[in-house]
């Protein structure tokens, strides 16, 4: 029994071999930090914008790519150029084109992956992103995290569910593959929110999803809330329960890019319950096998 539509399996089927992700830090900031959409950023977000695995933005992008290829030498022959840190569409179109072009310095790069916010993808930017499909596959990643409007407000996301749906629909018209980030163990969400999230993403026919476990770092607003006792994280058992629930309601054709977060190595107040991501995934898979369940088992609610 196939438990879920695993990214590694999808990539091997699509490209015939392993594809290695190369994280890039292009030095972008975020409209939710500069005042355009809000100030202070999302309450869980560090200054790096979750891109702590990448190099300094002072390093030219072409050099970052070459460094990462050398770092993973012998592990893969095909690569994904992944613009990870902060909001990677937060610049004028002519600037974005120059930045994206600078990453495509090696013919072995088969995917351009751009992580951004759903409120920062005007049509002209989507046209630019879609133009790269002539050369390689293109992924556009949207942070959503929750479909509950109250949770989005608590998180200070600075956008609504409606804006997310609009962005997905406009990107889909241009045949851009959409990957969505969700945090399944938000303390403010309940199981109904988790089910509704899976249903909405399935109805929108997104292409992939990254499921995260909530981690809390000291330097963030959420970190201060945690230290004051205002936030109580869910247990590991609750996280696994919600993760399975989400997968059961999710369209089985949607590719699972991630099942748990990768907290930074320092400054973490709460992260993955002191366990490695691999161990958590192993526990999740073991529980799914025990229940004889799988991605899409309850996917029976569309076109009825």
Image (cartoon, grey):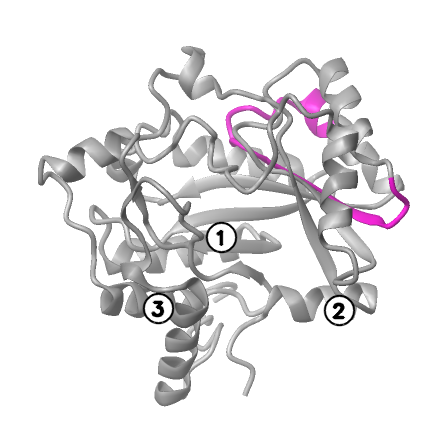
Q: Which residues are magenta?
A: 106-127
Residue 23 appears in view: yes
Residue annotated with mark 3 = 245
Of the numbered discs 2 and 1, the one sitting upstream in the chain is: 2
Residue ranking furthest to the top: 35
In this picture, residue 292 sits left or right of residue 12? left
- Please, which residue is most extreme toward the left here? 229
Q: Residues within 10 Å of mark 2 (few under 14, many from 20)?
A: few
Query: Residues under labels 2 and 3: Cα distance?
Result: 27 Å
Q: Relative to 69, say whether 199 is above or below.
A: below
Element class at badge 1: helix
Q: Which mark is residue 12?
A: 2
Disc nearer the start of the sequence (1/3): 1
The residue wearing badge 1 is 201
The residue lying at 55 percent from left, 70 percent from top is 252
Which is more N-terminal, label 3 or label 2?
A: 2
How many numbered circles are shown?
3
Helix, strand or loop status at disc 3:
helix
- Is residue 138 in view? no
Q: Residue at x 46, y 68 (%)?
A: 278
- Position of 53 with respect to 33 (left or right) is right
Say which of 66 and 49 sits in front.
66
């Amino acid at each position: 029994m196939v438990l879920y539509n695993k990214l590694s399996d999808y990539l091997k089927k699509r490209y015939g071999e392993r594809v290695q992700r190369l994280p890039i830090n292009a030095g972008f900031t975020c409209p939710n930090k500069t005042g355009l959409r809000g100030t202070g950023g999302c309450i869980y977000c560090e200054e790096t914008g979750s891109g702590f695995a990448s190099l300094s933005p002072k390093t030219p992008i072409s050099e970052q790519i070459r460094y990462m290829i050398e770092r993973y030498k012998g592990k893969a022959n095909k690569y994904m150029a992944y613009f990870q840190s902060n909001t990677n569409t937060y610049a004028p179109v002519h600037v974005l084109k120059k930045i994206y072009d600078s990453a495509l310095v090696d013919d072995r790069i088969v995917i351009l992956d751009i992580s951004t916010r759903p409120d920062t993808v005007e049509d002209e930017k989507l046209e630019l992103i879609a133009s790269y499909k002539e050369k390689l596959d293109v992924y556009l990643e949207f942070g959503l995290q929750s479909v509950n409007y109250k949770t989005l407000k608590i998180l200070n996301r600075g956008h609504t569910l409606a804006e997310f749906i609009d962005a997905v629909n406009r990107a889909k018209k241009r045949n851009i593959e959409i990957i969505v980030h969700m945090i399944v163990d938000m303390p403010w969400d309940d199981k109904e929110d988790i089910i509704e999230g899976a249903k909405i993403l399935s109805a929108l026919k997104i292409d992939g999803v990254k499921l995260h476990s909530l981690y809390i770092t000291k330097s963030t607003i959420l970190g201060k809330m945690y230290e004051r006792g205002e936030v109580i994280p869910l247990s590991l058992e609750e996280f696994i329960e919600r993760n399975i629930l989400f997968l059961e309601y999710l369209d089985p054709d949607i590719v699972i890019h991630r099942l748990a977060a990768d907290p930074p190595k320092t400054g973490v107040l709460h992260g993955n319950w002191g366990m490695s991501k691999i161990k958590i995934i192993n526990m999740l898979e073991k529980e799914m096998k025990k229940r004889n369940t799988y991605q899409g088992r309850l996917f029976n609610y569309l076109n009825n």
